[in-house]
Amino acid sequence: MSNLSTDRPVGAAVAVAQPHMFAELLRAMRPRQWVKNVFVFAALAFSEQRLWQFWLNPWPLLKVTGAFAAFCMAASAIYLVNDLVDIEKDRAHPKKRNRPFASGRLSPTVGIVAATILIIAVIPSAVALDPRLHFLGVLVTYIVVQGFLYTYWLKNVVLLDILVLATGFVLRAIGGGVVIHVLITPWLLLCMLLLALFLGIGKRRHELVLLEGGAGEHRRILQEYSLPMLDQMMSIVTASIIMAYSITAFLAPVAPQKPYPMLMATIPFVIYAIFRYLYLIYIRGEGGSPDELLLTDMPLASSVVIWGVAVLAVLLLFPK
């Protein structure tokens, strides 16, 4: 009788531990940040081919959706590796110390196994999506640069740490293009690079303000930055985004240019979204997690959705 009574709580503990472990693993994979991978869909809207031709044939949309899933898998593997490497530093951070690895709720061994499985699984998926191996090349470049070069070296090099993160967004867009064999307008790639720099600078600024005097103890590279420097960089990038997107709207080969460039109607939504994000950074003291702001701040989220609907309306209702 005593053995039976002892076994029951152990079995119950195991049953509870397994769902808990998978829940923590999913949290460590940061599914909220998968929203960044929507950049792969830019190939459908801003390629030099006509958008309506893709909607008539659902196959390109399915392939880009597969590319989105592949980038989600790769990004989650990178997040796991990054958290494992920074586990001690995260424990000194007021927010990051609650992450699964830093808090001790998830074993590092589980993270290593999960990251390995994700990286191995994403390779055949990339080959299946693009037998020419172009998409695989983009994805491997993304994993190597973002997951290893950045994690172990480049995140400790001033300015390059922000630039390298920004290239991840450009690689997403390029990946969406190569998987369906189309070219994306270069101006749009520049817009994506500038937007990623904008978000990266905002994130660095938030970390510097949040950690104050202890910023260098958590992340050595933060000692190389100052608020005036980041504010100056923010001003330059903000103006550059508006100019680059305006030129994209004026010259985009996917939209009609007569009687006037139709995509210019979407410029106000971009300006509002940028100004709203600046408001959240400078007035609300946010900006540490751009993906969370996009999902939780209704004015910002609404402006992005309206912009997307406006772009699709122009490209579908006014084919070139």
Image: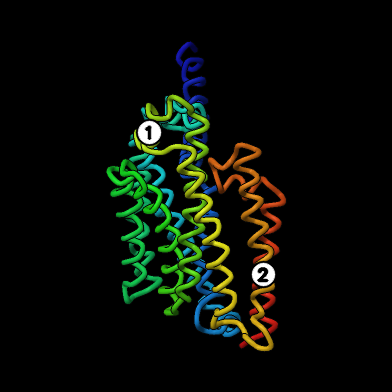
Q: Is residue 220 left or right of residue 98?
A: left
Which mark is on residue 223? Answer: 1
Disc number lying in front (2 or 1): 1
Q: Nearer the viewer, residue 36 or 241?
A: 241
| Type of amino acid under label 2 | Thr
How many C-alpha atoms fall within 10 Å of the one at disc 2: few (<14), some, or many (≥20)? some
Residue 291 visible in the snapshot: yes
Residue appearing at x 47%, y 15% in the figure: 6
**Considering only vertical position in the picture, is 206 above or below 41?**
above
Per the image, the residue denoted by label 2 is: 266
For residue 159, above or below residue 213: below
Q: Residue 304: where, in percent of width, then height?
A: 65, 59
| Residue sticking out furthest to the top | 2
Q: Residue at x 69, y 70 (%)?
A: 310
State left or right for residue 223 relative to residue 96.
left
Callout 1 environment at 10 Å: few (<14), some (14 to 19), or many (20+)?
Answer: some
Tell me the distance, in whole angstroms, between the alpha carbons under discs 2 and 1: 39 Å
Q: Please, what is the three-letter code of the amino acid marked with disc 1?
A: Gln
Q: Helix, strand or loop at disc 2? A: helix
- As helix, strand or loop, the secondary structure at mark 1 comes to helix
Q: Residue at x 42, y 68 (%)?
A: 175
Residue in front for this viewpoint, 62 or 148: 148
Q: Which mark is residue 274?
A: none
